[in-house]
Image: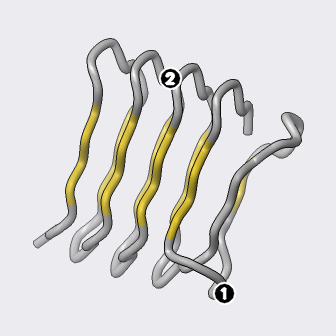
Amino acid sequence: MARGTINQHPMARGTINQHPMARGTINQHPMARGTINQHPMARGTINQHPMARGTINQHPMARENYQPTIPWLWNYQPTFHGSWNINQHPIAIL
């Protein structure tokens, strides 16, 4: 029943898990090796940029806007505030 869009680009070696009823968009860019988990009822957008190796977990109804800049942050669990977008930038190692 997922109504969202998954765009996994060529050469991407990561894993995308879009859960039932998710309506958001997942964009995994070239050479990305990370894991994207979009949980039920998530309506946001996940953009994983080139060479990103981290893990993105978008939880139910997540609206947080996250742009990691500190490479030693390991996992990010978005909360219930802010916008609908998660953007993982190049070389992010979460």
- Residue 4: image x %, image y %? 21, 64
| Crowd tier of the residue under label 2, counting other residues whose Cα lies within 10 Å: few below 14, some 14–19, many 20 or above | many
Q: Is residue 68 toward the left or the right of residue 85 in the image?
A: right
* Earlier sequence position, callout 1 versus callout 2: 2
The image quadrant of residue 64 is bottom right
Colour setup of the view: secondary structure
Q: Residue at x 55, y 79 (%)?
A: 63
- Residue 70: image x %, image y %? 88, 41
Q: Residue at x 60, y 42 (%)?
A: 55
| Residue 81 numbered mark, or none | 1
- Residue 16: image x %, image y %? 35, 42
The image quadrant of residue 8 is top left
Residue placed most toward the observer, 48 or 21: 48
Q: Residue at x 29, y 64 (%)?
A: 19
- Residue 92: image x %, image y %? 71, 33
Q: Quadrant of the N terminus?
A: bottom left
Asked which secondary structure carries label 1, the reply is loop
The image quadrant of residue 93 is top right
The reply to whether the C-beta atoms of the residues labelled 1 and 2 are less than 8 Å apart is no
- Tell me how far mark 1 sits from mark 2, CA to CA: 28 Å
- The residue labelled by disc 2 is 33
Residue 63, above or below 52: below
| Crowd tier of the residue under label 1, counting other residues whose Cα lies within 10 Å: few below 14, some 14–19, many 20 or above | few
The kind of residue tagged 1 is His
The kind of residue tagged 2 is Arg
Residue 91, above or below 42: above
Q: Quadrant of the C terminus?
A: top right
| Residue 29 numbered mark, or none | none
Q: Residue at x 84, y 34 (%)?
A: 71
